[in-house]
Amino acid sequence: MKLAQRMSRLGTETAFEVLAKAQQLEAKGRHIIHLEIGEPDFDTPTNIVEAGKQALSDGFTSYNPSPGYDDLKESIAKDISKSRNISVKKENVIVTPGGKPIMFFIMLAMIESGDEVLYPNPGFPIYESMIKFCGGTAVPVRLGEENSFNLNIKEVETQISEKTKLLIVNSPNNPCGSVVDKKDLEALSKLAKENDITVLSDEIYSRFLYEGTHHSIASFPDMVDRTIILDGYSKTYAMTGWRIGYGIFPDNLVEPISRLVTNSVSCTASFTQRAAIEATEGPQEDSILMVEEFKKRRSIVVDGLNKIDGITCAIPKGAFYAFPNIEGTGIISSEFANRVLEEAGVAVLAGESFGVYGTGHIRISFANSTENLIQAIDRIRKFVESKT
């Protein structure tokens, strides 16, 4: 059976590959500390679970409108209008099974052969994968360690061409934990308007900020009509397995994206949407406490890594990842990730999994218990000391 040529352009998400390898080691009796998966290690808040159960009991088990239930879309529109200080109507909200479909749908709808898409690098690997799969040219925007893993506006300006159709912004960033400041966002908004570029703003980690305030590029003048905001429930409410995300779209994209939903997944699970209403409108204490706990873990991980000879780690401002530089150990990052799993029982990801500019780093998710994080850092320290 011969696959279509485009399948050769489709990448993967290495975290799931490393998870599978780690689970194979566990099946052999090894104790593995999982720092590879970007998933909150908290249960979905009880009020949300109960809302989902009630929805099942109430018969929310059938198809629903492809863009989502109106009352959920209205709830999301109000929340985004308030948190981003913009005016959003429910008609501009499309609900999807997770956040990835938003990325895929917008590229399927907009990107053709020859079109260029600027995306953060190091960055979420699915950006590059989907750009290439849809026939576009992926143009990596370097997030330099010397700039706290932020983009350089002057460099971005030189990368824009007449073929540039889409710019992807991810703040807070996966894997670096960096946050694009308001001044740089404003500069990016001006470049987008001057060059007629649409922006996909991935704000899935918007609630995971450890200092400062979240800013959306959509909040700058005339940007609502050229920005797609991607957000969802997986991270903020520990609902990864519920599979529910959403996008805020300009008027002219609502109908074509809704058609793509109809043609692909039909709709998002009905009972999940009822639970999402409770998540949006109900108590927020659990989410707030979760972020506070992640902030404490951040200190444990960063401080511990910086005490290991050969490793330096910048302080992430958001998300729940650390992206330490391990070049000083003398071990290349791909080898480091493999060996620290096999020899020390700690699952991490090689920096190049997030793009060429991630080489020399590893990504550590601190979505694990304090006890496990302390033990993992100790295992990494002993591994490095034994090899240097």
Image (cartoon, rainbow, N blue to C red):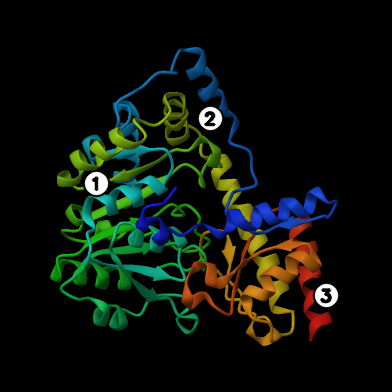
Q: x and y percent of residue 174 in the render?
A: 49, 62
Graded by Cα atoms within 10 Å as few (under 14), some (14 to 19) or many (20 or more), the crowding at tag 3 reads few
Label for residue 48? 2
Distance of label 3 from label 1 (alpha carbons): 49 Å
What residue do we see at 32% from left, 30% from top? 68
The residue identified by callout 1 is: 249
The front one of 127 and 167 is 127
Q: Nearer the viewer, mark 3 or mark 2?
A: 3
User: Which comes before the other along the chain, label 2 or label 1?
Assistant: 2
Residue at the image point whose x is 46% and y is 62% from the top: 125
Q: 321 left or right of 185?
A: right
- In space, the residues marked 3 and 2 are separated at their CA atoms by 42 Å
Look at the numbered disc 2 and give the secondary structure of its residue.
helix
Q: Amino acid at mark 3?
A: Lys
Locate residue 271 relative to residue 89 in the image: left or right: right
- Residue 313 percent location from the top left of the image: 62, 76
Given residues 54 and 156, the one toward you in this image is 156
Residue 382: numbered disc: 3
Amino acid, disc 1: Phe
Q: Is residue 104 above or below residue 271?
A: below
Above/below status of 376 relative to 329: above
First of labels 3, 1 by sequence position: 1
Question: Callout 2, which amino acid?
Answer: Ile
Label 1 element class: loop
Q: Which quadrant of the figure contains the C terminus? A: bottom right
Query: Residue at 20% of width from left, 42% of height from top?
Result: 256
